[in-house]
Amino acid sequence: SSARGAEESQSSPRRMVAIETNQGIIPQFFFPETAGTDYEQTPYLQRLARHRKQMTVFSGVSLPGVDGAHAAEKCFLTGTPHPARGGFKNGISLDQYAAERLGDQTRFSSLTLCNTSGNATLSFTSNGAPIPSESRPSQLFQKLFVQGNPAETEASVEALKQGRSLLDFVGDQSRRLNRTLPKSDQQRVDQYFTAVRDLEQRLASAEQWQYRPKPEVDVPPPQDITDSRQFVAQTKLMFDLIKLALETDSTRFISFFIDTTVIHQITHHGHRPEVIDELRGHEERQFDALNDFLTDLSESAEGAGSLLDQTQVLYGTCMGSANSHTNKNLPVLLAGGGFRHGQHLKFDNENNYPLSNLYVSMLQGLGIETDTFSTGRSTITGLEMS
Amino acid sequence: MDLSGLKMQDDQFRTFLKIHDRIESGKMPPPGQERPAKAELQNVLTELDAFLIRAEQLQYPDEARTPTRRLTRVEYENTVRDLFEMPGLQLRDRLPADNSVNGYDKNSDALSISHVNLARYLEAADLALDYAIATQPEAPTFQQHKVSLASQYYVRLLIQSNGGAVFLKDKKPDPDFIPVDGRQHIDQGLHERFGMFETESAVGVFRHEDESFLPWTQGFAAIYPGRYRIKTSLWSYTWDKGEVKPSRGVEAMRLSVKQLQGHGLGQDHPSYVIGYYDAPSIESQEHEFVHWLNPGESIGFNVASLAPVHIYHQYKRNLYSFTGPGIACDWFKIEGPIFEEWPPHAHRILFADLPLKPFDPKAKELSYPRRTIHKQVMSGAKNHSDPFPGYWTVQTDQPLEDARRLLSQFLPIAFRRPVSEEMLDSYAAQVQNRLAAGDCFELAMRWVYRAALCSPDFLYHVEPDGKLDDHALACRLSYFLWNSMPDQELMQLAAERKLSNPDVLPQQIERLLQDPHSNRFVKDFCGQWLKLREIAATDPDKKLYPEFSTYLQDSMVLETEAYFRELIEQNLDASYLVKSDFAMLNEKLAVHYGIEGVSGPQIRRVALPPDHPRGPFLTQAAILKITANGTTTSPVPRGAFVLDRLLGQPADPPPPDVPAVEPDVRGATTIREQLALHRDHVACAACHAKLDPPGFALESFDVIGGQRARYRSIGEGDSAERGSIDPFIHISFKLGPQVDPAGTLPDGQQFQDICEFQQLAAADSHLLLTNMARQFAVYSTGREIRYRDRAAVREIVARVESQGGGLRTLIHELVQSELFQTR
Amino acid sequence: MIHWWRILFCGITFTALMLPAVVRAEEQSSTFQLYGISHPEREADLKQILQMIPAISDYQLNQSGDHITLTYEPLELFAPQEQEQLQKNLPIPAEKTEQKLKELISQSSRNTFELLPAAEFSEEQFTRIEIPINPLDCKACRFAVYSYIAKVPGVVRAKISTEPSLLTAWIDGSQTSHEALLKILTDKNVPLPEDESAAAP
């Protein structure tokens, strides 16, 4: 398709899409028994069979210390331990960590998406503030692809300029205030000052992008689906936009929170067969949507390969079994992104392997030189770049 | 033992603290072991005490108890609302969610800030200023409209085709639009054109709100932000195969505010609930209230007290074969917007009495503000916008003088304290800059007002070191009891340095508590202390709990809040946390609890017979629901909740890698049986000995707070009796194993059921009062109570106990204490 | 194709002499075929609608309710600013006033009444058919049934009666038929007695 970012670096950019579905995935339909490349097909993985060579399935992994049942959903990309405890403070999320380092190449350093409302989010800043997500495809489309007229552009540039001068001013106010405060309090107000500076930089970058045309895409603007029971249809709509955003190099880092709280009640299935059937139906359709998304990415050519080769797609959930609400043995898979895939990496179900090590591998895969992220202390064993 | 100079990690500190507490409470050495002499133990305690205080000082060298913190998003919203007197402005959802520490978002450690927050503050300030600044010389026209429920397309559909509603005239079926009788009326479009829906008849509704029926009054949607008077006339009836007969009692109609989205259709419903209103049998009752509406907001309604009955399924759309309850609405009357003065207060606080004059938007020499054109967004609404009033803005011949005058009026109010000349200069200089850059006066002023609303002086609680001055005291007091900025009276007293005066302060505490704004304290505090904010986190399983409804859920919250308010108002003691001789109930809750003689949706005080378990927080449905997962209960989270929130004795977090319990509702095993396996684990036993007993006692209550002798089950079990469940609700569950609510406290005391447990828990009223003192202190001062604060808390508690132990006395003593009045 | 109607009235006749009531000098009267009187109750609705149009001073309905003669002041049919223009060129052309009358009636009745060119006919020329329908207690429903049939090509007159509950139509057999009308009713979900609906093709 169309216009890529104007100043693309020589090698194709590396990207990340991190997805969490928040009400668990029934483990027995997901996990294979056999490790390695010859793992057997399972009901859910069957639906992704087409991408078997392009993905790695993990078992026996979890985020160390991340517990608290539903509370864990906000730690899926941060890995910060004990979200349900009193003094909990979240940390930076994987996507934001990458965006802070590599996000300045594109119009949007990252996109934070959700299918339901802005309060559900996977992305957190370095001091643990949640980044509200975009939940309406129509608005996201507008933001990504709809060019304002010259008068509107001029007005936005002026608004951004005024925003920056205002931030300058309130930044000065915080320094004045700081002079009157004891030392320990100065750190608190410094945090405000840092926020001001961060936002100024963002506005400055946004201002630069105002002068450059948005990419054109030849698809009609999407119609929002507001009924949260249709979360699969909502997910598909978002997947389509994610693909467009990546193709047009509008951003390289995307988090997507698939909020299926509407079926929370049936995840407490209590082993009732008819309820498990119902839940399985929903989850199968979710995997079908993921399959379509992976197919779309793999069919979109980029450089010598496909968009999927350049894009890490992390898909998983924060609960190993929604019925017991345990946060161990998380169903997770990683597709694309130039890794040597096609295998089931099996770890210990009793003594889980840190999923955060996978995050270190993903960051390195993006070209970020780090040996740690969150509770991750090394790259994951058994997953190499191809 | 020489422990001085030892700097400890958090967990080491906690270990020593635990040792101290166990010796103090006599639990160490354990019973049966050899005990040192009392004096010896006392020596150890004294030394440990000094040691712990020193260790804490090393760990937190900062003298200030409460570090500087920003407003929570609820405080922010309330503050902007009060500053501009725009009481329904919706801001909190525009801001990122706050974190919380130990359950409180007011805790300074929870209140971080980042560019994300700041970007949202800029947007929120813009919205507030858009609404605040007057753009026309006269108020928008006051309009009065009478609206029928049948203004909504969906309601018409019920009337015309599926029997979910009927027209009623003179308390009988309307002969001009007869109820559907097994067929629908032919052709809705034609009935529309015929004017059949434009009748004065009342609309009787049978159908409860559900996924495909979200009713609101399509005849009205606010265009101008402001206050509107809303009146409605409601009654109820029993429909008996075509005849209207007296109803079973007082039914409840829920009214809500519905924010329309985009093309005039709503998204989620309702945006928020206004309240539940009486619909008495046959006799119409009129209700009237004034409410703030934002542009695009309409009034939603729901026949809340009716069971979800689908006439079109069960009765084949034949109202002549249906007998059941209905709620009728004669009309809605909506009047407004109401402005007592123009320009309104919001504008005056920004521009005082500067005149509005016309301007030419195409003028080249100056930048003028853009004006939004107010439009009706909902098709079918009767109210319409005024003709465009032209372009108006405040103007002045002496902009710099006026700017300084206006700023010197606005900034001290917004910042809740006097401002320095230096600060005033810096703001005024910005006005000058903007004027020089070509902004008109309004734009230049708007720039600084926006800056002020995003500045740290507005966003942070700025308090002096050490003892609070009168302004800081006024703020702490009003953010405690109103969850918002101080009003003029408090500011005046602070300016005169009279607030801290021991004659004045108690009066002000009383004034604040009696003011309706104190509901914000009740809501915000209970929302966090008792986690009421999580009330909707789980949806009860529809098969196990078919009688659950949002009306019940909203009533649960109202009960808890009303009970809390009653404890404060009546100055009752802390034993009422766990045991009571009255309850705060409406009919919905009373039926749910099996208590007779309560009619209608209004919450009122109901006396209970002796040894009735209901009434206190411990056995309120809200608490019982919040501590369950929607399908099953577990004694563990419930026990943890009781220990932490009510008794103030939080349990340690579970050790890592404990296998989770796998719930099974097929009826074979109880959670207690599953837990027994768990408790046999040595690592778990000690904590569970503390955790489980309150949870065991609460096993007598199900996930929606109903009392039970047997667990509900799907699958195996005996068929269940209907009990108080509405006859229209299908009983889809069975009765499984017996509940065993007996247990043994760690000190060996035994209880057979919830009432015996309540006796034991209520006996230690000192423990309960100390907990309340700590909870109030954390909430109002924005920080944890540390070890070194224990003496202060003890003193407050002692003073309260000497005056009878009442919770209102506690608020007084806390506010008057050094703990509260020192940063 | 044979035109089945014969024009009785066409254009405008001065009717001042025909009406005993006080008549203003400029009053005219016109006769139209009237769509909308599905059953006698509808005459009250008609009266209400006509009262909403001050320019109309009187009306007369024929026996079968399908023709109406309206008496009106032509100039007053129009908005004040239009009147100024029209006054320069009196009399107002007949087509213009008739068009205006049609618009006014359609608008004020939300198309539940319409004026059509006058076209009275003698009943014996056409086939009269009767279709029993389930009792309809609602006047809008009765009108709905009428509206489905009255404008079908080949139907020259239709009415709904309540006792017995019946649709009566006069049709030109070369253009439509009993079966065709029955099919329209079943397609529109009009409740018919069981043996009738069974007869529908």
Image (tube, coloured by chain):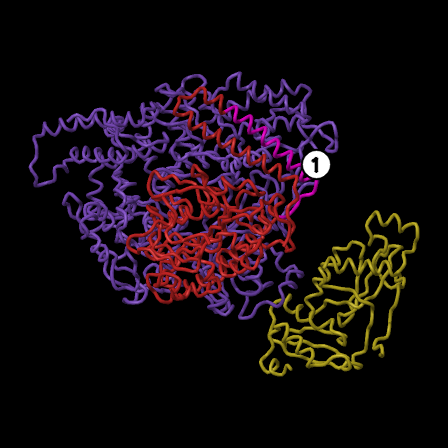
Chain colours: A red, B purple, C yellow
Where residue B693 appears, as percent x and y from the top left, is 21, 48
Q: Is residue A30 found inside the magenta-colored segment of the image?
A: no
What residue lies at 52% left-to-right and 44% top-to-bottom?
A110
Indicate the position of residue B562 as horizontal and vertical percent values: 37, 41
Q: Main secondary structure of the magenta part?
A: helix
* Disc 1 chain ID: B
Quadrant hosting residue B719: bottom left
Element at label 1? loop
Q: Seen in the image, is A332 located left or right of residue B646? A: right
Please say whether residue A225 is visible from this viewpoint. no
Instruction: Out of B136 and A146, give the one closest to the viewer.
Output: A146
Q: Is residue C8 among the parts visible in the rendering? A: yes
**Coordinates of residue A159 in the picture (x, y in percent):** 62, 34
Residue B650 on image: x %, y %: 26, 40
B394, above or below A361, in the image: above
Task: Specify the quadrant of the image occupied by residue B56.
Answer: top left
Image: A185 above or below B574: above
Given the image, on which type of amino acid does mark 1 rest?
Pro
Tell which of B549 and A121 is nearer to you: A121
Q: Which residue is mark 1?
A: B389
A170 inside magenta stretch? yes
The stretch in magenta equals A145-173
The image shows residue A49, relative to residue B525, as above or below, that is below
Residue drawn at x 73%, y 81% as measured from the top left: C128
Q: Quadrant of the N terminus of chain A?
A: bottom right
Q: Nearer the viewer, residue A43 or A59?
A: A59
Q: Quadrant of residue A270?
A: bottom left
Which residue appears at 78% of the width and 79% of the height? C123
User: 10 Å neighbourhood of mark 1: few (<14), some, or many (≥20)?
Assistant: few
**From the viewer's perspective, is A235 left or right of B353?**
left
